[in-house]
Amino acid sequence: MNEAETGTGAVTAQSDDDEFAITLGIEEEFFLVDPRTRDLLVDPDVAIFEACEQASGAHKIVREFLRAQIESNTRVCSSVATLRQALRETRRTIIEAAEQHGAAVLAASTHPFASQTEQMTTPRKRYESFASRFQENVRQFVIGGMHVHAGFGDEDSRIRIMTVLRNYLPLLHALSTSSPFSQGRLTGFKSWRLTLMGGLPRTGVPGPLHSWAEYDELLGEYQRMKFIEDGSELWWDIRPSHAFPTVELRICDTCTRIEDAVCIAALYASLVRRLMRLDKEGNLPLEDHTDIIAENRWVAQRYGVLANFGDSRRLSGRTDIEDLVTELLEDVAEDAHALGCEVEIRRALDIVREGTSADRQVDLFRLSRVEGASDAEALRKVVDQCIADTREGV
């Protein structure tokens, strides 16, 4: 489901000769666009989905909450290199199927000008129940995201490491931002998607958990009170997967360029591996206060790669994002080397210096307006740019 249902993820497949082995999988949610109007295809040709299913191979490509969306789920990947190839394969499959049936594909977490009132829900019982329960909250859900699964360790270690990973959620989100527009308006945020997600319960930064038993007790209370049926309805920014032995990073916007998605997955994997080593030594870093993480999350939403994060380690109380990324790259260098993704993680500095999809969208819109384009013309140019960037590297 769009931002609210478990998809396929990586299954742990530890190597005999590497106690810190990690497997990866990514879910990406895309929009299907009318190439003529650049608006969403409210009710796209069903043949697109059928063609994707037939050509998906070891991956999984499925319908989404809105008919105008489609979701890819990569196969289980044992390295960042194989994950990049998997992303190319899933994007290529969707793009080719869409083009064969008169559609284009846009990877971003909001469409620049699509109207929420015109969208149609995919006819599926769970989606219909979701829409009925949450009403106006989900009627605004013309959004999509990217979820990265990391398979590693045992249940308790995954919970301990997940709790420390919360510290890095704002930074990882800032690198992914791709939703500055909503219904034709500049929101002033680099990620409007998270604002819309906040209308649902059980979203945002989870509280600290330190064992699987503690997580299981909380899950059981939610179920006993009949708030949820299972763990897939915990829509936290990071969570233990309901269906797989993975920790699922859910905070990120859909990356328009494939290399940005690979960079974030590589950083996440490197962080996980570093924390696995420290956990074995009994030396996990201290977890930040949940309220401070949430504040930094808002800063990432608002400013993206221009964020100046709160940092309790600094006398000044703040850290510039470029300094934070530089420090992080040094911290995970050993692990990135072990995972073979040193080049991929270094792209994080390029993202900070050059901007994310959100920055490119806003810059193009403003430049087009200065050059005399109307709002509608400028927005269509933004759509064209996003479609082109979605294809880049595929």
Image (spheres, grey):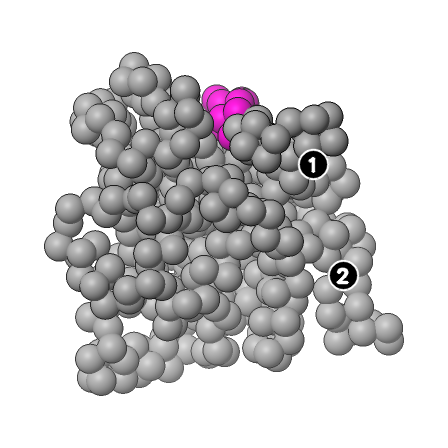
State the extent of the magenta-drawn residues as a range. Answer: 382-394
- The dominant secondary structure in magenta is helix
Q: Is residue 388 magenta?
A: yes
| Figure quadrant of residue 316 | bottom right
Question: Front-most of 385 and 339?
Answer: 385
Residue depicted at x 74% and y 52%: 306
Above or below, 70 relative to 275: above
Of pointers 2 and 1, the one earlier in the residue sequence: 2
| Amino acid type shown at disc 1 | Arg
Q: Residue furthest right?
A: 315
Above or below, 241 relative to 388: below
Question: Front-most of 272 and 282?
Answer: 272
The disc at residue 366 is 1
Instruction: Give the residue at mark 2.
Output: 308
Residue depicted at x 53% and y 54%: 192
| Amino acid type shown at disc 2 | Asn
Q: Is residue 360 magenta?
A: no
Q: Looking at the image, can residue 190 be seen?
A: yes
- Marks 2 and 1 sit apart, C-alpha to C-alpha, by 24 Å
Q: Position of residue 24 (x, y in %)?
A: 43, 45
